[in-house]
Amino acid sequence: MTTATKRECGTCSLCCKLFYIRTLNKPLDTWCQHCKPGKGGCSIYASRPAECADFECGWLADKKLGDEWFPARCKMVLSQTQNGRPLVTVDPAYPNAWRREPYHSQLKVLSQKGVPIQIRIGRRCIDFKTEEEVTWIEGRPENSTEAAPA
Ligand code: SF4
Ligand code: SF4
């Protein structure tokens, strides 16, 4: 657990790679054209799209998550699907990141408490508990934040 009072993105820009940005027609898992990873991040920060400004990063928001969940370190971004399910979006360059420790054990504890965790790796969406693939909402295959079981 962390005792930090306020978290900051620092050198992380991982959400600017992993998520679909409708306004910019930025595909999944591709660095945004406006991002300079490790060199200041967003180059259009003041005028970035609302969907970027409104993004809620789980690690920034939830102080109960340890520093090991810093996205640039764990290679995963925690957020929520549109229907409120916890979503772990995995950097496809590290597709097994969610299976590593201490992450898998922590996710398992939450899952055993009934938290319906969903894992996205590229275009695969997996229910953590069953490890079965779940279906993208039809017509929204590009938008990971809208991924949910059919
Ligand atoms: S994934 Fe979270 S910590 Fe990393 S840049 Fe995005 S908002 Fe910041
Ligand atoms: S516009 Fe800025 S905040 Fe939005 S994805 Fe691109 S680099 Fe990230």
Image (cartoon, rainbow, N blue to C red):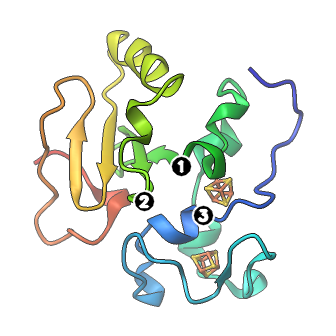
**What crowding class fits label 3: few (fewer than 14 Cα within 10 Å), some (14-19), or many (20 or more)?**
few
Do the numbered discs 2 and 3 sit on residues whose CB atoms are within 8 Å?
A: no
Horizontally, residue 137 falls left or right of residue 55, namely left
* The image quarter in which residue 26 lies: bottom left
Choose the circle earlier in sequence order: 1 or 2: 1
Residue at 36 percent across and 22 percent down: it is 115
Q: Position of residue 41 (x, y in %)?
A: 74, 74
Do the numbered discs 1 and 2 sit on residues whose CB atoms are within 8 Å?
A: yes
Q: Which residue is mark 2?
A: 93
**What crowding class fits label 1: few (fewer than 14 Cα within 10 Å), some (14-19), or many (20 or more)?**
many
Image depth: mark 1 or mark 3 in front: 1
* The image quarter in which residue 21 lies: bottom left
Q: Which residue is mark 1?
A: 75
Q: Quadrant of the N terminus?
A: top right
Q: Position of residue 54 (x, y in %)?
A: 60, 64
Residue at 67 percent across and 43 percent down: it is 70
Image depth: mark 2 or mark 3 in front: 2
Q: Calculate the distance from the C-alpha at mark 2 to the C-alpha at mark 3.
A: 26 Å
Q: Calculate the distance from the C-alpha at mark 1 to the C-alpha at mark 2.
A: 8 Å
Placement of 138 over or under 96, stated as above or below: below
Name the amino acid, label 2: Ala
Q: Which residue is mark 3?
A: 54
Name the amino acid, label 3: Asp
**What crowding class fits label 2: few (fewer than 14 Cα within 10 Å), some (14-19), or many (20 or more)?**
few
